[in-house]
């Protein structure tokens, strides 16, 4: 039976990036049916309401096997809706936000080659968006940490280490200050660790690992970095810089019954329509979705083709030291993908 994927093109550079991803997926001969739907700030500014995701899109998501989301803009300020990504993560319990971090050949790795995976709890923490104004002077934000969610994301991290042949999980916390929230998170990680005697646990305080990732990032090679929602949002962004461009970082939001795939970067509205930005994160997020939906050979071909284009250096975008347009780089990836699968 044909698998279906809901596709949200998003805001800013989103539509042109998603078009590039679809071009490469079609070059791979995918059998997945892509169903286009709307969400994001652009749709909300035109239609209003209390959500960036229209009802029609929720219906498409409910009947799809996976979702691909291009970068979307989240309006700021009091009373504005929560982000598209957070809304989808919470509705479908996509508790594992995963970002592989690995240096590409012939790319600018500012602090040397790295290879690690960032695993982020995706459903709670400060991202529940619960804030209370106590007085005119005092507002507080609620950081929700449950042992249930902490245990689930810890087990995912250890399983990810086992799948990749990595030897360590690095839980990132601040339990000396946040004794209840970070304390319970760390306790659950240590409980889960007992089921994985061949995988080490290296606890790091959030401030210390931020420094160590700059000082000596290679000590975390072939490690899984694990943390709560906001901490890992920040740390994974720092890790993204280690490979030279956020435009190379693809990600997945995984639950037990559904998944959403997306580039790790934002919508970059100042570059919208300029055919300029790096398509790799979007293309590889799409390749990961193909793998998730059972098209492993096609997915592997896209990854190989992308590495070839980057290593050749002829058709790469400005952030990788080249002058190619978004569409040119995507076109080369599509061409090589088709050649690999012949």
Image: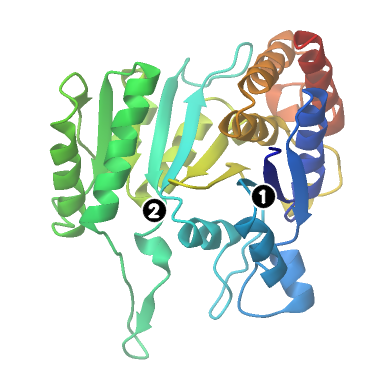
Left or right: 155 as drawn, with respect to 46 = left
* Quarter of the figure with residue 209: top left
How far across and down, in percent of the image, does residue 147 sit? 21, 55
Q: Up-down: is 311 above or below 334?
A: above
Residue at (31, 19) in percent of width and height:
219
Query: What colour scheme has been applied to the protein in the rendered image?
Result: rainbow
> Is residue 52 in sight in this rendering?
yes
Q: In the image, what residue occupies the spot 24% across and 46% down?
A: 151
Coordinates of residue 75 in the picture (x, y in percent): 62, 68
Residue 287, x across and y down, in percent? 65, 29
Q: Is residue 207 visible?
A: no
Q: Secondary structure at mark 1?
A: loop
When asked about the image quadrant of residue 108, the answer is: top right
Residue identifier under label 2: 230
In x, y percent, where is residue 73? 66, 59
What's the distance in space between the residues labelled 2 and 1, CA to CA?
A: 19 Å
Judge by depth and name the residue closer to the eye, 157 or 306. 157
Residue at x-position 74% and y-position 56%:
11
Q: Quadrant of the N terminus?
A: top right
Q: Is residue 7 left or right of residue 255?
A: right
Query: In what element is the residue under mark 2?
Result: helix
Q: Where residue 71 is drawn, which disc sits there?
A: 1
Q: Quarter of the image holding residue 204?
A: top left
- Residue at image point 31% right, 70% down: 142
Q: Is residue 32 above or below residue 126?
A: above
Structural crowding at the residue carrying mark 2, measured as other residues with C-alpha within 10 Å and reported as few (<14), some (14–19) or many (≥20): some
Closer to us: 336 or 73: 336
Q: Is residue 87 left or right of residue 316?
A: left
Relative to the observer, which residue lies in front, 168 or 27? 27
Query: Residue extending furthest bottom?
Result: 136
């Amino acid at each position: 039976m044909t698998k279906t994927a809901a596709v949200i093109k998003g805001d800013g550079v989103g539509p042109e990036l998603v078009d590039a991803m679809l071009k490469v997926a079609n070059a791979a001969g995918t059998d997945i049916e892509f169903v286009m739907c709307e969400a994001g700030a652009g749709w909300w500014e035109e239609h209003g309401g209390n959500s960036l995701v229209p009802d029609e899109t929720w219906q498409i998501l409910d009947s799809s096997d996976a979702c691909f989301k291009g970068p979307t803009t989240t309006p700021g300020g009091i009373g504005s809706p929560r982000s598209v990504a957070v809304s989808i993560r919470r509705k479908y319990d996509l508790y594992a936000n995963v970002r592989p971090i690995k240096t590409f050949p012939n790319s600018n790795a500012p602090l040397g080659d790295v290879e690690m995976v960032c695993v982020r709890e995706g459903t709670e923490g400060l991202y529940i968006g619960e804030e209370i104004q106590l007085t005119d002077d005092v507002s507080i934000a609620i950081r929700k940490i449950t042992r249930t969610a902490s245990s689930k994301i810890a087990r995912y991290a250890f399983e990810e280490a086992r799948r990749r042949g990595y030897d360590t999980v690095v839980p990132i916390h601040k339990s000396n200050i946040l004794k209840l929230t970070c304390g319970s998170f760390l306790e659950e990680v240590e409980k889960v660790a007992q089921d994985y005697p061949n995988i080490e646990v290296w606890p790091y305080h959030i401030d210390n690992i931020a420094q160590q990732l700059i000082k000596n990032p290679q000590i975390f090679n072939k490690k899984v970095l694990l943390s709560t929602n906001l901490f890992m949002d920040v740390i994974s962004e720092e890790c993204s810089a280690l490979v030279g461009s956020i435009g190379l970082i693809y990600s997945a939001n995984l639950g037990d019954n559904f998944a959403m795939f997306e580039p790790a970067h934002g919508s970059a509205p100042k570059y919208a329509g300029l055919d300029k930005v790096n398509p790799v994160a979007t293309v590889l997020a799409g390749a990961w979705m193909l793998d998730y939906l059972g098209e492993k050979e096609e997915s592997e071909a896209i990854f190989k083709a992308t590495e070839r284009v980057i290593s050749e250096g002829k058709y790469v975008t400005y952030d990788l030291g080249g002058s190619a347009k978004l569409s040119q780089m995507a076109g080369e990836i599509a061409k090589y993908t088709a050649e690999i699968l012949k």
